[in-house]
Amino acid sequence: MEVGAVLQAALSPNSDVRKGAEQMLEEMQQSPQHPVSLFQIIVDNNIDTSVRHVAAIHFKNFVAKNWTQEHSVFDKDFLRIHILLFLPQIPPLLRVQLGECLKRIIHCDYPERCPNLLDWIKHNLQDHHIYAALFVLRILSRKYEFKLYEDRTQLSHIVEETFPLLLNILNGLVHIANPSLEVAELIKLICKIFWSSIYMEIPKVLFDQNVFNGWMMLFLNVLERPVPLEGQPADPELQSSWGWWKVKKWTVHILNRVYSRFGDTRMQNRENKPFTKMFQKHYAGKILEGHLNLLNVIRVGGYLPDKVINLVLQYLSNSISKSSMYSALQPRLDVLLFEIVFPLMCFNDNDQQLWDEDAHEYIRKGYDTIEDQYSPRNASIGFVSELIRKHGKDNLHKFIRFLVENFKRYEEAPVEYKPYRQKDGALLAIGALSDKLKQTEPYKSELEHMLAQHVFPEFSSPVGHLRAKAAWVSGKYAEVSFSDQNNFRKALQCVIRGMRDPELPVRIDSVFALRSFVEACKDLNEIRLILPQLLDDIFKLMNEIENEDLVLTLETIAGKFGEEMAPYALGMCQHLAAAFWRCMNTAETADEVHDEGALAAVGCLRAISTILESVRSLPRLFSQLEPALLPIMRTMLTTDDQEDFEEILQIVSYMTFFSPTISLDMWSLWPLMIEALADWAMVLFPDILCPLDNYISRGTAHFLTCKEPDYQQSLWNMISTVMADKNLEDNDIVPAPKLIEVVFLNCKGQVDQWVEPYLRITVERLYRTKKSHLKCLLMQVIADALYYNAALTLSILLKLGVASEIFNLWFHMLQEGKKSGVRTNFRREHDKKVCCLGLTSLLALPADQLSGEALSRVFRANLDLLVAYKNQVAEAAKEGKNEDGDNMNGDDNGSYKAVEIDAEDGDEAGSSKHRKLSEQEKVFMPNDQDDDDSDDGFSDDEELQSPIDEVDPFVFFVDTMKVMQSTDGPRFQNLTQILEFSIQAIANCVAQHAEIREAEGNIYLRHLLAQWVLVGLMSFEEFAVLKRLSLVH
């Protein structure tokens, strides 16, 4: 069957015929002649247009998929030549599809495999195929639109070759007396080419003032010339996309871009300053004048597209900060501010129509950040805000006086004549200026009166958009210190009533405002009593519409009430899960890239995390939440959307950390994370580390015993691949050695078979690591292995032939410091502790495994490290005391858990113990003021929780030495005799200090177990058994 017949069948109304044709087209792609056959159909004028269109679409998809494949066998040269040959001849519908093909070809092949393309463009610019040449030049220029510096070399050549021709063409087009719509299309293409060429940097050819002047005069001509009335569509939506308005928009775009690049000499390098001064002197003011004249069209009732208004106001906003431009603006400022900008801020006919006909769309446009970029209202707010920020002394008072006059006219007018829309605009202005008014007298002192007189009454307005605006403005001022708390209560009650308003936009703005009131509320009893009602109202709205602010309000409530959310946590998570699936379904069917549904879906995940955080002290609740959350986790861990993936990893971290046990269903998520890491998610390795750590540390038995799947093998495959990858930077693989540490510390004595493989890849990576932070982590893996099994580890290092080299490097890193005396390596408390435990484990080895010389060296290094560790702990405890109690490890102790444990929610007994220890440590070797062991700005966002948390390095060291003394007295005596007196004194202090810490540790353990009893992690009977066995004194 020929391709043409198959394409005709693909248009069949019969679905079976259509599917069969599509299957045949898929199979035909394997033929080397397939793309040529499709192309021949596209350019054949004798074939039905619909068939040619289907061929063009299939051809475009084929090129997109196969053009870059190295072993492609189709005739690329034929296609390169003939696409250009036929481009001028085919209708616009097909030209669009071939344009997409050309974009792919040019991005892949130019200039190396398209050496004649620029000559073709130049030839056709001087011939009668101007449109086709501009069409291709636009695609070519877009390739370099965002390129910088040396990547723009080709663009510079393109500009030099084509801009003289373009300028000549544009000059001719602009001076046509009665231009057609085709002329507009040509001018628009030239504007787009110019835009792409100047977006990142002005080409050098334009630095010639004569050349630049030629372009600017033509653009100013287009800016000032009225748009032809003949042929304009009556429909406003079609009107904004009409060719001549597109030309106007692109002209304003270009003038704005040049001004943003060269409007301020202070932002320029020396080379560009002469050009900047020339631009400011000759053009900036003319552009300002042209923009003001353009805006005057809407003042007298004319039409301007929203995007053009927005761009013009952006130019004016950028001009305010330049004194010369502000001076030029001042004579027309009052007219601009009060007769153009303020009316743009007011509610209008389009708003009312959308409010009445499609409330959902009204809300979407109001909360969509993408819409804001083109909104005249948003640009008006931006202009007023910038004007007040830069020249508030001249303008704030008169603008507020103008708003107050609007308020008075509104109050005095009869109900049937009240200027509701102007009142809406005035309220919008008051809300937009909230930050300024809250800081500036005399307005700051009058805010409560203003709210009570002009805002709160509109909660009862018969006009829906004013009720919505009253809620929004009230939220902007919720944190004001009300002298009369009844005003705060009244506003809060009005906002809550607004959540049940018959108009959907009012309900949404009320929920938006509620978030601010919840954050500002000093007495939560105001809200606590009606919390179930609030949650129910929010859930009803979530069932009705996808909106991120609904979820943010829910998140704020959960964060504010904390553990009090426990009775509602299950219901909230179930509602959020249901809302999440609705949002995802909306996002999948939406045409827009930045769909509100997708944003709301991420918000749902974030709110779930907040709820999990708020109920973290109730571990049994997590198993109840799992059925609702597991399907989301399982599905979204297969997505490649980074934002969704990050939020899901946070939820998985909570579920694996706080649940009493990790269920088999939760274990099924492990392979998904490993697969994502191997496929695309390397950038999220630090986030994936958190749940993997939890699986190993809190589900150790399952990790060790399960063989289907084999989690140990899975982890090794991933870590070994990452550590061996020479294309990964040091910073990329930091989580890998941390995971090895998790295995060694949590599986002590149970993973002997993995010690050698992990040590081997650690040593291999260590030899080619440059970053000191990663070197420290890799060396700590060796320390962890020594603590795991010193004899096994030492034998492996000897087998690998690296023992001497590794220990020499380690001791060098321990001694390395900066000029200030600060240690270069192992700067966190955890780093030092791991090294201490590893070195102390070496001391326990018998003489035939560790010689006397090596023993002495290890002993000294360990003692020095213990002193440094002591000083850092003491300093952290001191800072913690000053800040009302941080934990012993302070900010320095990095962790693998994404979850932070606040002191008030965690171990108060532990904090008390640490404070006592910090006082007792003062007896122990006075601090050297010059030996500041701070991190010098180094920080690790993590907060480590591992099995060594309860291992005291001092006690461990002393116990080890006591064993040596009792089992090998001569060796112990020999060691102590060769030590200097100062070292012996330090060793004695360490021993005394260890006794104190051991005693305090028992008190700490008793307090800890008592807490476990209180929160339900241990029964009274279990606690009593421990006491009877003398395990707790």
Image: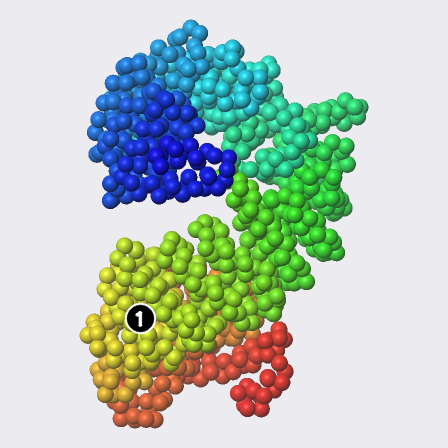
Residue 928 pos. (x, y %): 36, 68
Residue 878 visible here: no
* 366 relative to 287, above or below: below
The amino acid on which the numbered mark 1 sits, given as a three-letter code, is Tyr
User: Could you tell whether 475 is left or right of 226 in the image?
Assistant: right
Residue 507 falls in which quadrant of the image? top right
Residue at 44% from the left image edge and 67% from the top image edge: 693
Res 86 quadrant in image: top left
Q: How many marks?
A: 1
Which image quadrant for residue 483?
top right
**Considering the image in quadrants, where does the C terminus appear?**
bottom right
Viewer-nearest residue: 2 or 288: 2
Q: Quadrant of the N terminus?
A: top left
Left or right of 526 in this view: 713:
left
The residue nearer to you, when weighing 42 against 939, is 42
Front one among 685 and 718? 718
Q: Indicate the position of residue 413 as horizontal and vertical percent values.
A: 77, 23
Please indicate, yes or no, whether residue 509 appears anywhere in the rendered image.
Answer: yes
Residue at screen point 54% across, 25% down: 306
- What x and y, as percent, mark residue 720? 31, 65
Q: Where in the figure is residue 101, as x and y percent of width and height?
A: 34, 33
**Furthest residue toward left:** 801
Query: Helix or strand or loop: what does disc 1 sit on?
Result: helix
Residue 968 lies, with reference to residue 786, above or below; the image says below
Please determine whether, in this image, residue 707 is positioned above or below residue 208.
below
Looking at the image, which residue sits at the far front? 1
| Residue matched to label 1 | 758
Q: Is residue 798 above or below residue 433?
A: below
Residue drawn at (61%, 70%) of the image: 620
